[in-house]
């Protein structure tokens, strides 16, 4: 199987690593440095832009296309250009080829759920995006599931919880505080990539799969656990009301603080995926060990 990974960045490079031993993988990035990072990981890199159909002509045919492009943390309009327009461009471009892909997988975010007051959510929970950007993500999910059907292909959504892992542990954020209350829904980078690999290689034909680990955790106990493991004092805490009282809090952060949910991975578990890092306890071990080694 040949897999093309569009926007082959943090998760995409790991996905390529996991696939490369048994499959042909092509990673696509806009920049030369991005292509170099792909090739350093041991598989082929191609320079192209998902919003430019002409540039995608440099990418070879594929059996499956994974759309993992990022808008770079910019606002809703930039997100729409990549996640909606870019996704449509990519699906149309590959779908119109003589040897078109059979599968498209789009990597989305649990941000599309909005606020559920700490209740559990799963793949059947109605979406209630609360920001302009998460509204774009919800629209992109519809494109990802519906547009491939026009070309006889199957479109799926892998809905990621908060990503963490190498270079993204953010230990200091929790050890130093202040830590704002609320739930954390997380998945280690290796399992985010592993779940997409599983969907592809096990030929799972689910339309939507929520990719999150076994145990959503409240931020205050999580921060205290990290502090105990690292041998430091528990960090200062603040309530959501305390944080919202800060006049410098942006509207985007304000909306995020006012959303609360716990994400279930029951469907992914039932499909047969086995997590490398079932909870934060296993997932943060490497970061804790590195912290302790540096403190010696």
Image: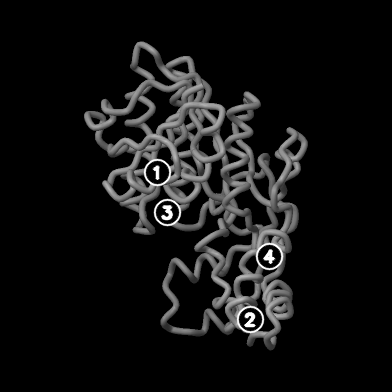
Classify mark 3: helix, strand or loop: helix
Classify mark 4: helix, strand or loop: helix
244 to the left or right of 230: left
Q: Are marks 1 and 2 in contact (CB under 8 Å)?
A: no
Q: Are marks 1 and 3 in contact (CB under 8 Å)?
A: no
Local crowd at mark 4 within 10 Å, few (<14), some, or many (≥20)? some
Local crowd at mark 3 within 10 Å, few (<14), some, or many (≥20)? many
Q: Are marks 1 and 4 in contact (CB under 8 Å)?
A: no
Reading the image, the residue beneath label 3 is: 133
Local crowd at mark 1 within 10 Å, few (<14), some, or many (≥20)? many
Quarter of the view holding residue 84: top left
Q: Which x, y percent locates residue 101?
A: 45, 20
Badge 2 or badge 3: first in the primary sequence: 3
Q: Which residue reaches farthest left?
A: 54
Reading the image, the residue beneath label 4 is: 285
Distance between mark 1 and mark 2 Cα atoms: 41 Å
Location of the C terminus (image quadrant):
bottom right
Classify mark 2: helix, strand or loop: loop
Q: Residue at x 34, y 16 (%)?
A: 97
7 to the left or right of 229: left
Badge 1 or badge 3: first in the primary sequence: 1
169 to the left or right of 93: right
Reading the image, the residue beneath label 2 is: 239
Classify mark 1: helix, strand or loop: helix
Colour scheme of the picture: one colour
Q: Which x, y percent locates residue 238?
A: 62, 83
Distance between mark 1 and mark 3 Cα atoms: 28 Å
- Residue 38 - label: 1
Badge 1 or badge 4: first in the primary sequence: 1
């Amino acid at each position: 199987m040949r897999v093309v990974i569009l926007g082959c960045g943090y998760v995409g490079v790991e996905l390529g690593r996991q696939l490369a031993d048994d499959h042909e993988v092509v990673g696509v990035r806009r920049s030369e440095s991005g292509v170099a990072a792909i090739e350093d990981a041991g598989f082929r890199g191609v320079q192209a832009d998902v919003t430019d159909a002409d540039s995608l002509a440099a990418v070879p045919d594929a059996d499956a296309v994974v759309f993992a492009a990022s808008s770079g943390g910019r606002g809703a309009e930039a997100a729409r250009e990549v996640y909606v327009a870019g996704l449509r461009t990519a699906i149309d471009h590959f779908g119109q080829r003589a040897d078109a892909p059979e599968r498209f997988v789009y990597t989305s975010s649990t941000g599309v759920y909005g606020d559920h007051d700490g209740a559990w959510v799963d793949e059947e929970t109605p979406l209630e995006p609360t920001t302009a950007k998460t509204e774009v993500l919800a629209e992109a999910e519809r494109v990802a599931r519906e547009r491939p059907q026009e070309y006889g292909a199957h479109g799926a959504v892998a809905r990621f919880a908060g990503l963490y892992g190498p270079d993204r542990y953010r230990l200091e954020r929790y050890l130093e505080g202040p830590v704002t209350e609320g739930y954390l829904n997380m998945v280690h980078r290796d399992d985010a990539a592993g779940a997409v690999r599983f969907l592809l290689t096990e030929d799972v034909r689910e339309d939507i799969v929520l990719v999150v680990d076994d145990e959503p955790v409240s931020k205050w106990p999580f921060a205290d656990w990290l502090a105990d493991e690292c041998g430091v004092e528990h960090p200062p805490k603040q309530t959501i009301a305390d944080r919202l009282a800060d006049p410098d809090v942006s509207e985007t952060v304000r909306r995020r603080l006012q959303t609360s949910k716990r994400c279930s991975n029951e469907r992914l578990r039932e499909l047969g995926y086995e997590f490398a890092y079932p909870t934060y306890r296993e997932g943060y071990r490497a970061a804790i060990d590195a912290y302790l080694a540096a403190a010696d």
